[in-house]
Image: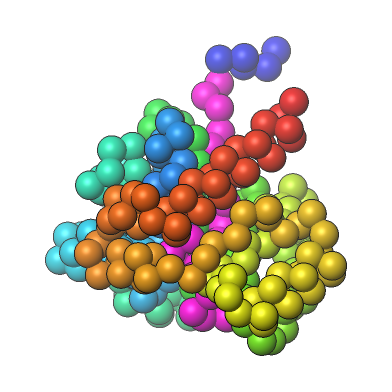
């Protein structure tokens, strides 16, 4: 008989794009903060060795006693690795530069692609009752990103509204397809998010038009504008929703969170 009382599993979203500077970490942080505003409990897993998501949520390097390196390769209990942030119900597993050597160490492990998958399905995680786990991936399609895709239910792709924006997207989609075929048949693309969109710039409109023509409903209705408040917020170690709640960037990330929840409600209906 199935256990009807088994704790529900959090939905895991990997935020990935092998191109840097597309708003990946900014999106992970602010989507998480927006989901918390909507009553969800969120864990951010930082698997980018640069650790920008950790810094952006105010986690000092000296406070990162345990990190995603320990999550993947160490023998540390999961609750010891998770840190609280200044935002209630928004927690993080931080990263440091130590993670940059993980790729080489993972290569010798026969379960190298499944380490994050297994770590995020420990019984200890169920008691923490997260609704969403957001994984901030490094700007490359390396073994860390593959681990994120194997662990995730879906991949959210930030796409900067600039020339050549669609270049490289086919490679990312191909990687998603390969992971689906070999390791995670449930993996899907959550959606493509247009970021740094300048409504005064014809190029931004052209990129949006091309993306919607080529990708259809895969592109979110919500577009993240180029907004100085979004750029300033990380230097104050907070999401833009906390830094300037009324800014255009904050409003856009709230809309994104609502759109994602709407999609998930339709999927679960």
In the picture provided, is 194 more to the left or to the right than 247?
Answer: right
Which quadrant of the figure contains the N terminus? Answer: top right
Position of residue 245 measured from the top left corner of the image (x, y, whole percent) = 34, 49
Which residue is situated farthest in the front direction here? Answer: 200
Which residue is nearer to you in this view: 231 or 150?
Answer: 231
Q: Which residue sits at x=56%, y=33%?
A: 9
Q: Residue furthest bottom?
A: 163
Return the x and y of residue 262 as percentages of the image width and height: 65, 36
**Quarter of image, res 66:** bottom left
Range of the magenta residues? 6-27
Of 32 and 109, nearer the camera is 32
Vertically, is 24 above or below 202? above
Residue at 36% over, 76% down: 50
Q: Tell me which residue sits at (53%, 37%) in the image.
A: 10
Residue 14: give x, y in percent of width and height: 57, 57
State the residue in front, 187 or 190.
190
């Amino acid at each position: 008989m199935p256990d009807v009382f088994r704790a529900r599993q959090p939905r895991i979203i990997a935020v990935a794009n092998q191109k840097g500077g597309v708003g990946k970490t900014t999106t992970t942080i602010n989507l998480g903060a927006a989901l918390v505003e909507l009553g969800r409990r969120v864990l951010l897993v930082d698997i980018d060795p640069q650790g920008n998501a950790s810094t952006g949520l105010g986690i000092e390097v000296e406070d990162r006693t345990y990190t995603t390196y320990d999550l993947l390769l160490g023998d540390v209990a999961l609750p010891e690795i998770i840190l609280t942030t200044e935002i209630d119900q928004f927690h993080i597993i931080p990263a440091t530069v130590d993670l940059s050597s993980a790729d080489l160490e993972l290569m010798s492990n026969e379960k190298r692609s499944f380490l994050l998958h297994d770590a995020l399905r420990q019984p200890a995680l169920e008691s923490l009752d997260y609704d969403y786990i957001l994984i901030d991936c490094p700007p490359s399609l390396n073994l860390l990103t593959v681990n994120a895709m194997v662990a995730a239910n879906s991949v959210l792709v930030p796409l900067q509204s600039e020339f050549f924006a669609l270049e490289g997207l086919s490679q990312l989609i191909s990687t998603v397809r390969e992971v689906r075929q070999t390791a995670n048949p449930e993996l899907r693309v959550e959606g493509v998010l247009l970021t740094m969109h300048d409504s005064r710039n014809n190029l931004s409109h052209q990129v949006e038009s091309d993306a919607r023509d080529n990708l259809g409903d895969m592109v979110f209705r919500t577009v993240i504008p180029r907004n100085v408040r979004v750029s300033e917020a990380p230097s104050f170690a907070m999401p833009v929703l906390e830094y300037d709640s009324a800014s255009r960037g904050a409003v856009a990330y709230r809309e994104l969170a609502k759109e994602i929840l709407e999609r998930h409600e339709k999927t679960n209906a």
